[in-house]
Image (spheres, rainbow, N blue to C red):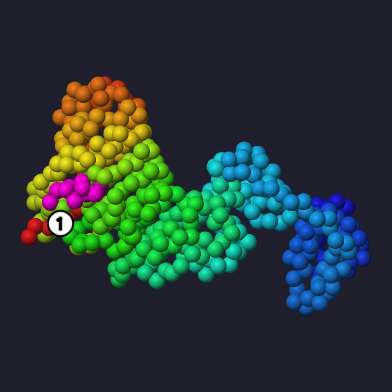
Amino acid sequence: MTTDELLEWVREANVPQRELVATISTVHGDAIRASPDADHQRLMRAIKKRINSASLRAERAALLASLARTYAPPPIPAMTRPELAAPIADWLVYGDALQAIGDPRGELVHLVHAVSEGRITADVCDAFVRAHWEALLGTTMTRHADAYTFEWQLCALRGATIRMTAQSQDLVARLMQAEASRDLCAVTLVGETSKDLRAVDLRPAMQQLLELAPDVTSFAFIDARAARSHSLTDATRGLVRLAPLAPFLARAEHLTLEVTDARELDFGDFVAPALRSFALRCLRFTDEGVQTMAARLASLDAPRLETFELRCVEHWQVGARERPRAPYVDDFDGDDDADGTRDDGTNDGVDWRQLDGLFAALAHAPLRRLALTSFDSAPSLLDALWVMRLPATLEELDLSDSRLDAANVDWLLDRREVFGKLARLRIERVSLAPADAVRLEALGPAIVYSHDARSPAYRDVSSWE
C-alpha cells in the first residue's frame, strides 16, 4: 500500500476508531516507521486527527509513541536564503525546501507568489500569516496582531502598516523585536482617532522608528480620518500629532503625508538628499493665502526627486445652512438653493504663483511625475507652471480633481512648445467638458481624462460669520 493509499484509508476507513488503532499498530506500523520524513509527518498528522475519541486518549498516545522514529533522521543541510533580488525560481526552490521541513515560510513563499500572479487574493495570504503568527513573527506582537498589516516579498517582510490609537504603546518597538523585521524597508504609521475625538500622538512611535529601524527608508504618516474625508469644515487643527520631519527627510527615499492641516507640519530645512518620491495630501493648505506653506516648501533640496505630489486645497465659504456639522466630511455637497441650483459657496481664489520658490526647486530636480491636484484657481496655477518651465525629464503632469475650462485648454494649446513635450497629461475627475478634452488631444501628450462637474472634491470649507 502506497503512502497516499494509506493516508486515504486512515482518513476514510469506515471502521470504529478502536479497530483502527489495532489495525494501524499490527498491520501498518512497520511501513509508517520506515516511510520518508515528509510522508511520516503526513501520516502522523492524519492519525492524530482521525483518532479523536476522548475514551481512546491512552490508546492513541501509545500508538503514536510506537510509530515514532526509532532512529535519528539525518540532519537537514543548511539552506541559504536567496538574495532579495534573486530570480523568483530561486525563491520557489527555497520555499520547497522550507516546506519539506515544516517551516511555514515555505508555504508563505508560494502564497505570495500566487497573489502576485492573481491566482489567489491577498486576504488568503493575510489569513495564513495570522494562523502562523508566532512562527513567522514571534510572540512579542501576538496580543496586538490586529494593529499590523504586512507586505511580503516572498517570505521576506518588506513593509508594515501600524494602526495606532490614543492607547497604543510600543507597537513599533514590538515589531522591531521580531527577527523578520531585519528586511523591513517601509513603515506606515496610521493614527486612528476615536469617536470621542481623543488626539493620537505619533511622536513616540516616530522616535522609535528613528532609533530602532535604521534601514527603513520609506515612510508614510497618515491621519486616518483625514485620509477618509474630502472636506474639512471649521476644524481648528488635526487630531494626529507628528514629530518634526527633518530626521526622516535626512534619510528617506519615499515620504507620504496624509494630514488634516499642512500648516502643522514641521519640515525643518527640508533637506532630503536621498528623497525620490514625496506626497503631501491634506484637507487644509491655505490661510489668507499660501504664504505660510510657500515659505516652508521653498527650501526644498532634493537632488534625486523623481515624483512630487501636492494636493492644492483651496478655502471655500458657504452659508450656515449649507455648512456640514461634522468637521470631517466624506463628500461635501452644498444644499440646493431655492431655484434648484447647487450651492458650492464662494472661493476668493489663490495665487499659486506664490509657490515660486518650490517650483524653482522642482525645476532643478530630475522629476518624472508632477501631481498638483484639487485646485480651483486654474489660471494662476497654470501660469506658475509656465514660469517654472517644466524639467526636461518630466513625463507625466497630473492636474486631476480640479476645475478646468475651455479657456484653460486654449491657454495650454498656445504653449505647445512646453506642455507638448510631456508623455502624459492626467486630468481625471475634472470639470472640463468632454468636447474640450477632445480638443486638448492636439497638445501632443496622451490625455487621461474623466469628467466630474463637482470638482474639486477636496475643499476646506467654513461658514459665513
Residue 192 or residue 331, whichever sits in front: 192
Per the image, label 1 sits on a secondary structure element best described as strand
Residues packed near mark 1 inside 10 Å, few (<14), some (14 to 19) or many (20 plus): many
Say if residue 452 shows up in the picture: no
Q: Does the image show residue 417?
A: yes
Say above or below: 402 vs 221: above
Side (left or right) of 312 relative to 153: left
Give above or below for 9 relative to 436: below
Q: At x 41% / y 62%, what residue is drawn?
A: 207
Q: Residue at x 41, y 48 (%)?
A: 252
- The single residue placed furthest to the left in the displayed view is 465
Q: Residue at x 61, y 40 (%)?
A: 86
Segment colored magenta: 288-297
Q: x, y (%) of residue 345?
A: 12, 50
**For residue 249: magenta?**
no
| Residue 217 x, y percent position in the rendering | 45, 49
Q: Main secondary structure of the magenta part?
A: helix
> Residue 409, how many percent across, how many down?
20, 28
* Left or right of 109 on screen, residue 274: left
Depicted 113 relative to depicted 33: above or below: above
Q: Residue 127, position in %: x, y? A: 56, 57
> Quadrant of residue 74 in the image?
bottom right
Which residue is denoted by mark 1 in the rendering?
462
